[in-house]
Amino acid sequence: MALKINFNAEAAVTHTALLRNERAMNKSLLRISTGNRILSAADDAAGLFIADQLSVVAAALQQGNRNIQTGISALQIAETNVGQIFEKLQTIYTKAQSAANDINDPNARLALQRDISNLTDAIQKIGTDTEYNGIKLLDGTFSDKVIHYGARADQTITVGISSVKANDLGSYMVTGKYSTNFEAASASAATVNNGYTTSTGAVQPNSNFRWDTGDIARVYGIDVSSGLSFAVDAYEIAKKINESKELQNAGISARAKNESVAAADWTDIQVRTDQSVSIRFYVGSDNTADITITVGAGQVLTLSGLVAEINSKASANKIAITAKAENNKLVLTTEGQTIGLEVSASAAANGGTISVNMAQFLGLSSTTVNVSATASAAAALATGSAIQVGKLVIMGTDKYNYDFTGITGSNQGLGISDTSGNPSGNAEFKNLYSLDVRSNENAELALDIVKTALQRVDKIRTQIGSVINNLQAIWDGQKASFDNTKEAENVIRNTDFAEEMSNFTTLQIRMQAGVAMLAQANALPQLVLQLLR
């Protein structure tokens, strides 16, 4: 072999191997000490890119969940305060119910009115002042607010809360009124029938009237032989509205009531032996729902006797009408059904004169059915007819329009029209500040307004709850995505300690072997000294 002293190739090669082993061992040592498999882009360029992108997604998911938490916090504040408003509305409702009781004197009703006003002010303050980090939540300005939950652009959810201030809570209402009309007749020897018979009833279904999605106009009208083409049945309209799923989903409901207070004080009807009086009440659209009371020859009809007969026959025939005497006046009440009245008076020849004031039965201006038969005249008969249409109240949580164009004759007794007298228009909004419980009628209307306000507030509250649940579900899903994304990044970026310790041990042994062999390689040139001796 050739012996040289200027260049020790074996030592150089061993040194190079030793340096490589040292570099590998140092990198292994750093991986173990830092826990990162990729210490620089040179270690795994593609892996570093993928791991960094996964890291960005994971960080964005984590921030998205923070955004969700802040959104939930704001909505929880809103939901709690809307709950307080609901409780106050519930209190207002019971106070209005108390005020509707006529046992209360004016002072009691005034006290209830003050309580309601104070509660209304409290609702206004809650609606105005509720905020999160300076952002108003319940005054109507919190609308179309975006919560960015996702890791990418446009992964958002839009939330909004309608105003629950007192001046924005209430009911969109269409309100009718009690309407009466009459046809009275006087005859000495002829029959005049301008009203109701058993074949027509008080109200007849009319198929010409329409029912459209945007309209509230399926009604029942009357078609009588002459005159009085006037009446609809408020009860039937309210029933159809309340049975409509479409209108229920739109937050629209209705109620009807018909209370007739006679215009005239009661005067007993005294019938001579050659006279007779027939009083017939029709109720609603059922042709058979009539009550006939006959005052025969020589009889006297008192107010208490009339009330007893009406209630007895109504109960026996299941007719929805009740009667009572109040301040010497007849008071008739139905569930909104139109009340039809037909009064007939007859006298035999030489039967004299008999008069019946129809204003004793309904809230009419004084109108009298007169019959006069003299000795030389034939028997005489006269008939007068009258109606009273019930009050219809339609309530809605949101705006809607009404159309009663198909009902002629002043809406055929409903008394519904806009300020210009048109039979169609937009429902009028009545807020909580319009509540006035100082009379029975106004207290009943207040109940309608507050009932609709309660429905609206409850709807808003449930919508907030639904959004909270939705955000919580998104949070749960994103938390799982975050965990899985971090795990995927961990597989690429982080050190497998079991594998790396095994590798580090191998490199350590190589370093020890390398150092030993470098010592041997450095000793080789010393052989030359043997030749120089």
Image: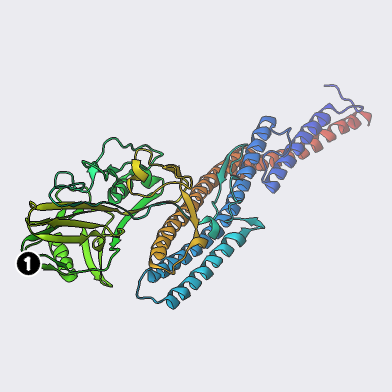
Given the current orientation, which residue lies at the most extreme front position?
376
Q: Quadrant of residue 247?
A: top left
Which residue does the numbered mark 1 point to in the structure image? 298
Q: Is residue 283 left or right of residue 510?
A: left
Question: On screen, 231 above or below 447?
Answer: above
Q: Nearer the viewer, residue 96 or 529?
A: 96
- Quadrant for the C terminus in the image: top right
Q: Nearer the viewer, residue 492 or 222?
A: 222
The percent coordinates of residue 23 (x first, y second) are 76, 37
Given the current orientation, which residue lies at the most extreme right position?
532
Question: On screen, 40 above or below 316?
Answer: above
Q: Is residue 39 left or right of residue 374?
A: right
The percent coordinates of residue 515 (x first, y second) are 78, 39
How packed mark 1 is, by other alpha carbons closer than 10 Å (few <14, some 14-19, many 20 or more), is: few
Q: Residue at x 14, y 49 (%)?
A: 288
- The amino acid marked with disc number 1 is Gly
Q: Residue at x 22, y 65 (%)?
A: 323
Total marks shown come to 1
Q: Is residue 529 left or right of residue 493?
A: right
Q: Is residue 80 visible?
A: no
Q: Nearer the viewer, residue 403 or 121?
A: 403
The percent coordinates of residue 107 (x first, y second) are 45, 78
Label 1 secondary element: loop
Q: Is residue 311 visible?
A: yes
Q: Nearer the viewer, residue 91 or 409?
A: 409
Applied colour scheme = rainbow
- Quadrant for the N terminus in the image: top right
Question: On screen, 352 above or below 212?
Answer: below
Q: Is residue 527 left or right of residue 44?
A: right
